[in-house]
Image (cartoon, rainbow, N blue to C red):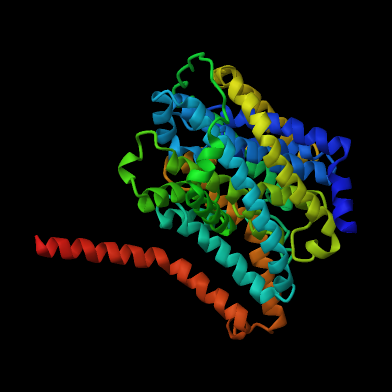
Amino acid sequence: MDTVIKAFGLVFQFDVMIAIVASAFYGLTVGALPGLSATMATALLVPVTFYLSPIAAIATIITASAMAIFSGDIPGCLLRIPGTPASAAYTDEAYAMTRKGQAETALGICLWFSALGGIAGTLSLMLIAPLLAEMALSFSTYENFWLAMLGLMCSTLVARSSPIKAIAAMLLGLLITCIGIDNPGGVPRFTFGSTDLLGGIEVIPALVGVFALAEVMRSLTERDPPKIENRKLGSILKGQWKLTKEYPKQQTRGNIVGIIIGVLPGAGADMAAWVSYAMSKRFSKTPEKFGTGHPEGLIEAGASNNASLASGWVPALLFGIPGDTITAIAIGVLYMKGLNPGPSLFTTQAESMYALYIIFILGNIIMIPFGIIMIRLASKVVGAPRSAVMPVIMIFCAVGAFATAGNNLFAVWCVAFFGIFGFVMEKNGYPVAAMVLGIVMGTMVEQNFVTSLIKSDGSVLPFFDRPVSSVLAAMTFAALLWPVFSWTRDWLKGRSRAVAA
């Protein structure tokens, strides 16, 4: 109880509460703007966290990401334009309800079940993480190496594009982490005689570039979204309790799927939403109603995407492995604030962990009143011209990178380079999330691998003859070979059809 009381004391401080409220409105605003993702909102917050206390810094990341995921549903409901990728799964369903005159119900479902899903995900984080932390304390460098490799391979399984392209993007991220002298040998690598590259590529400028600046470049190639009609909305939460009692199975299934997908490295809220919406239609008694403004799929997917947010912090806090792109940014902030991820975090700084749980629950509770306010203001926020928003974002990218890198202009050039690079990658179907996973985890993979080889005197047998290590190795190779299996299966099916014809 002493730890819990200390945690409440850490959260209910003036600077932390101001950070929560300010980041809540910021997340709601960015999420409501079509085309701006929750990841971008989080990346732009990193420079601000540099000047905040550790708990206030983490509070801004948690609150802004949760609010942005929900707020992305607003333009989806009213304009049929998803505000964030997580909203794209059920945009047509929500817009169909709006066309039937049920905009309030659709927005209420997105708000209410997102908040409930977020709380369910937080409870899973509170239950799962401490249990896994006890088990993880017995892990050695061998297990940590295979765990990091498994996280990298999982990014290929959940990639929407070609698994081969996902692997290529991930390997590119690993190559980027090789730059500099921060390696076990202390030897300059890929510096090309540049003193700026001796320190390697900082994670934060790379993240800001591929997520924020690339988004600005993408907006230049797309047309502005249509203006939202200024119409008066009725009660937002009317009938939501009735829907909660009517669809308990869908809500529970969405929460469970979101929690499971959130724990998988590299998956995230958008994948959880797509999978849950597809499952809802698959197991529905009335699948023919989907796409016509039916609340069933909306409830399940809405609960799932926010549930995955909290559970995505499980691998991030335990092993420093990002559950999604948002936690990839959060890991950088944790290291910057001295809260180094790892199982010992739950014992040495237990009050900080409880504070994190409290912030998650608090963020999802205040989502309801703040979300209602944002829905009322939707016509003003959604209609903001891109020509006014994008230059401001570019300034934040440049100034933020400059400040977080110790007033180093090289960081600004890094943001520019990775912005162009991320834009080109996405245009050609290469997932930038897989590359980010490689950048974040490259150091962990290399250090554990080299340390293990030193301990075993160059032998690779200990990587496979330890029980847990061998299981993780088998899972890693299975994930690596899955694209080959899928390609072979599709090729055989195509050949059998050709023979039959």
At which x and y percent is residue 381?
59, 21
Residue 150 falls in which quadrant of the image?
bottom right
Residue 317: x, y in percent? 71, 58
- On screen, 349 above or below 31? below
Locate the C terminus by quadrant: bottom left
Q: Which residue is drawn at 60% across and 55% down?
A: 323
Q: Is residue 374 visible?
A: yes
Quadrant in which residue 175 is drawn: bottom right
Q: Of all residues shown, which one is farthest toward the top?
A: 230
Could you tell me if residue 37 is visible in this image? no
Report the quarter where the N terminus lies. Answer: bottom right
Front-most of 305 and 441? 305
Image-based side of 464 in relation to 350, left or right? left
**Looking at the image, which residue is at 74% across and 39% down?**
60
Counting from the top left corner in percent of width and height, residue 177 is at 64, 56
Task: Tell me if residue 452 comes above or below residue 434 in the rendering.
Answer: below
